[in-house]
Image (spheres, rainbow, N blue to C red):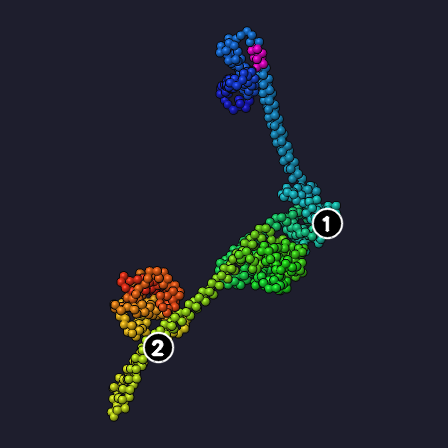
Amino acid sequence: MSKFERSTRPSTAFVLRYGLAVLSVAAALSITQLLRTYFEPTPNSLFFCAIVVSSWIAGLGPGLLSGLLSVGVIDYYFLFPRYTLGVNPEDVPRLAVFLVSAASISWLSGGQRRAKESLRQARDELELKVQERTAELRQINEELRAEIAERKNAEGALLSSEAQLKQAQAVAHLGSYEVDALTGHTRWSDEVFRILGLDPASGSLSRQEFVERLVHPEDREYAMQGYDRVVHEGKLYDLEYRVIRPDGSVRFVQSMGEPIRTPDGGAVVRLVGALLDITERKQSEDSLARLNRTLQTLYQCNQALVHASDEYELLQTVCRILVEVGRVRMAWVGYRELDREKSIRPVAQAGYDDGYVENVKAIWADAERGHGPTGTAIRTGKPSWTQNIQTDSSIAPWRTEALKRGYGSNISLPLMSDSATFGALTLYDQQPNAFNERTVEQFTELADNLAYGVIALRTRAERSRAEHALREAQAELAHVTRVMTMGELAASIAHEINQPLAAVVTNANACLRWLTGPIPNLDEGRAAVARIARDGNRASDVIGRIRALVKKSATEQAHLDINEVIQEVLGLIQTEIRKNEVVLRRKLAPDLPRILGDRVQLQQVILNLMMNGIEAMSAVTDRSRDLLIRSCRYESDKVLIAVQDSGTGLETESLDHLFTAFFTTKPKGMGMGLAISRSIIEAHGGKLWASPNDGPGATFQFTLHVGSKEEEAR
């Protein structure tokens, strides 16, 4: 059966096969009719194709049917008279030849198809026989293996070969070896020689020679003890150690195998095993471990950057993390100096140094001592590294000192700010070739983060110093302003002090008269002394308030009653109010919560606003000079203080500049009072603003935050 026949059931296959013959003839007719629109083709060719397709795919019967249909179609459509089934005698030979050709084609195509089918069946039978033979061979092979296993104890040589085969099957591409447990003589495969870097023609080494000449000095005792233990205990073994090839290269090998005893199960007579070069695996494991350490190092260094508050403490912490977590031999940071020698100043260091950084005296100049990794990194602004300190010429001036301290390779990474290098982070590792492309990229990222952290700390420190200087300047300016205000109030203050002092003098004279009379009047004397004490305290209070305002002292935050602060200021300007014929009104809300602030600074603000209000009304002659001081609760967590006058008011264009330093509307004003007052209020977390009244004058208001009960308790 053909593929076509195998894919369908018998009845369906019959319909499809003969249907294909009809369809192929119909297709040939359609194509021929289509081509007739362009030229007059020879119809036989396409119908021959239909016959070939039918007989090749569906077999001889459909091919013959296709031929008969083709003869009928050619006669009907292409021979005269057309479109009739009548045959012209002249066309009979032609149709006969076509029919014979069609039958021949069908027979040949069908025959070829049958031949291929026979060939396929023969191939299938052959494959079946091969499979059967293979199964027989596999069975024979299994029987042979079973027979070999049964004869294992009888043939020692066969046992040794089987052990080698077992090891080779377990691990591909291994070098195999045998060791005579009694004499120490060995026999190696060519692969063992290749792993050890030896010429097979030189012959195998004895076990003792192998250990002494090839095994790494640090691993010799371990290897000897491992082999001795195998011989004595007779157990499977798996050892890993290093070997040094004749060319000096170090390779990691894994030696594994089993001991072979005498046929009677007695002493171990041979060691049969395999030697695997695991250098690449070890290097991969080491690279992975190094990568993990590097990532952990980067994480901890970034944490140090986040929490750092001091530049040099940060640098020292990063160096320590690189040594303790990153396991580099030594790490140090050097800053570029702009001296004549272009020296590099060490600022932080961790790890095994033993005076190395001080001894090398690295520079960043374009000279021999500046061509090392640190100098090059600073000079070029790019990472620079030495993969092998023992052979790299760029580190020749410091090679001896570096090798003394066990440095195998190093890398220096520039610390940059705005494309300018200000230092370098240099790392030394114990192993040569310790820094690959991936670690260089990661350490470069670390250096960039470190440089950013250093610049951020410097900026923060500079900002802190600037803010401190600004606060000191503001405090000094505020103090000067207070002193100037006191100077302006000198006459009023003198009057405030003279009044109680005059009363003291008067009462003192009266007291003398009462006490020195013929009959001393002690009661009157006592009353006079009480008045003296009262007036003295009154003068002392005035002087105390003046001293507090004039005194230069640090800011002192306390919980204050704002109404009390206002009353103290009013006590200082009573004479000024009377002198300027000002009507003072108070609207101080009772039971206001305490605010947290500096008493002297707030007194300065209130005094400045009230003096400004008095001065603003000095030219008013047509109305009452009213000055209102008001306090009240503002929103839920603030108090508001307002000073309202009935003076000349504020011009609209001056409102935007009113609190700007050196802006003033007074002929002799400095323009600093309101600017200082606003800075004081804003430093207290409040807000100061001004607005014109609906009528004459202006109102200046400021808010202050209420202190919490917890803060007041503290």
x, y (%) of residue 42?
A: 56, 16
Residue shown at 30%/84% (left/top)? 505
Label 1: state its secondary structure: loop
Q: Is residue 560 visible?
A: no
Residue shown at 72%/52% (left/top)? 209
Part of the protein shown in magenta: 94-102
Amino acid type at circle 1 is Leu
User: For mark 2, what is the residue?
Assistant: 543
Q: Residues within 10 Å of mark 1 (few under 14, many from 20)?
A: some
Compared with 217, 192 (above or below) is above
In the rendering, which numbered label is found on residue 205? Answer: 1
Compared with 443, 479 (above or below) is below
Q: Quadrant of residue 372?
A: bottom right
Q: State whether the magenta stretch is mostly helix, strand or loop.
A: helix
Query: Considering depth in this image, is 602 or 180 the residue closer to the camera?
Result: 602
The number of numbered discs placed on residues in the rendered structure image is 2
The stretch drawn in magenta includes residue 351: no
Compared with 516, 25 (above or below) is above
Label 2: state its secondary structure: helix
Q: Is residue 86 visible?
A: yes
